[in-house]
Amino acid sequence: MRWMTEWDSAWRPLLSRIGVTGPISVLWYGIALLILTVVYIGTGRFGLSLGAFSGFATLVWLPSGIAVASLFLGGYRLWPGITLGAFLVSIFAGRSPLIAIGISIGSTLEALVCTTLLQRAGVRSALDSLHDVLVLALVAAPVSAFISATIGVGGPLLGGRIVWSAAYTVWYAWWLGDVISLLQLAPLLLTWSTWPRMTPSTKRLIELGLLSVFILAVGLFVFVGLPYPNLKRDPSTYLVFPPLTWAALRFGPRGATAALAIISSLAVIGTILGVSPFSDGNLGDRLFSLQSFMGITAATTLILAAMMAERYVLERRKDEFISIASHELRTPLTCLHGYTQLLRRQLAGSDHPHALRVLATMETQTRRLSRLIADMLDLSKIQAGKLTFTDETVNMDVLVYEVAEQFQQTSSQHQVTIEGNTSGMVVGDRERLGQVLNNLLTNAVKYSPGAECIIIHLAPTARYLTVSVQDFGIGIPKAEQEKIFERFYRVAGKQRQIAGGLGIGLTIAHQIIEHCDGKLWVESVEGQGSTFSFSLPRCLS
């Protein structure tokens, strides 16, 4: 057992420096190195079988992406697996031990340099920012691939295994193959290294299924099903952009990398079989044209996905800020409102008319501010999918008359008139439906300052009950009528901007009506007024 003692005394300090301590850690470290080495050899031999230039460089070199992802996720201690894998791939390919050592050094340095550049720049495995993608695409991938290609080609070139006239072609094929792997396979492994935390909704799963079918259909149609002569005469290759854009916009970096992997796999298969648009020349020339196209496609798709991910993060932070700010403002505002009412009661009947008017104004403004804060809270709940509803059977006629009466007490400038009746019931949240109607009445008052009348129309049908609020104000341009239900959208124009508001009341109203399986819409003519209507399914039981 002397050899075990000697091995332990020789290697234990080295393993401890890289964080491998104890028998279990040593075992798992050995297994990780073995797996990395085997995967490296398998993917490397596959790549070299695909039209390698001078037997050295291939345009489909998967090990580069695997190596960088392994070091980025598992740490620098896995570098021996890369070195051993690259060395054995070269030996199995019939290269001399000296050339194999040089290639393994270049491959290891490539992975180490790329990983170091990514980590020093603060790149995250999610690749969910434009900064991260640009560092990978413009710095880490091309620089590290340059090192590997230069060392890998330099040895055989000096040894006479590659003629000088073919040196640039071999070097460029080596460099491009590594860059493509770093732009496609490495992002795929990095972004999917952690499983999504949120369980997708049914609608999301349906959309994902449709996208998957679309990607497969386009990939098979473009790269496998049609034997077109070449890219220049065939614009069908650009059909890959719609599904890739869909994946990037709706599913972020994970969706983009998965879509790229599917498209690239089908493209390589079709090119090898000679039935893709990249079918001119020998296999090496085909792959050269294909990988050049896919490199640009991958970089563009990753940039788009990262920008959308950044936008999502900013939207989420904004919603969190609105939620926190609204909660924090509510308490002092409630206190202020209470003290204002207390002062009004104490001064009622006293000889202080000016003070009473000021207090009345304060109460009106605090009530208005309270409504704005409540709207912001509701908006943040909508964005988080946490807006609560208490559904019950609601008599629409009674609700409309109650809301109109309460609203009339706070607005003496406009006369609210109710015409017709619904004589029906709906299922919904009574408080939320009252909120919708109150919002429509408030908007009618704000945007018809010169009018004196607001009319509420009630109309039933066999299946729906319709409530309409008509004003005789400034109206809404036809081109902007569909946009007013969007979050924070306000119609342009000096006269319209005078009226206060955040542009979220109609968004909340639209969500409430949608929850009740109803519809909210507007009809308007500039200078003549607007009519906002919503219809709800009649309760038949």
Image: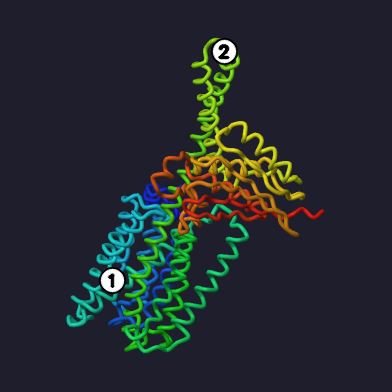
- Of the numbered discs 1 and 2, the one sitting upstream in the chain is 1
- Residue drawn where x is 37% and y is 70% of the image: 297
> Residue 175 got which mark?
1
Secondary structure of residue under mark 1? helix
Residue situated furthest right in the rendering:
541
- How is the structure coloured here? rainbow
Return the residue nearer the eye: 349 or 183. Answer: 349
Q: Which residue is mark 2?
A: 347
Return the residue nearer the eye: 84 or 294. Answer: 294
Relative to residue 440, is residue 17 drawn left or right? left
Quote the CA–CA distance across marks 1 and 2.
Answer: 84 Å
- Residue drawn where x is 76% and y is 49% of the image: 425
Image location of residue 50, percent across then percent down: 38, 81
- Residue drawn where x is 34% and y is 75% of the image: 293
Return the residue nearer the eye: 516 or 94. Answer: 516
Whether residues under marks 1 and 2 lie with C-beta atoms below 8 angstroms apart, the answer is no
The amino acid type, in three-letter code, at marker 1 is: Trp
Can you see residue 31? no
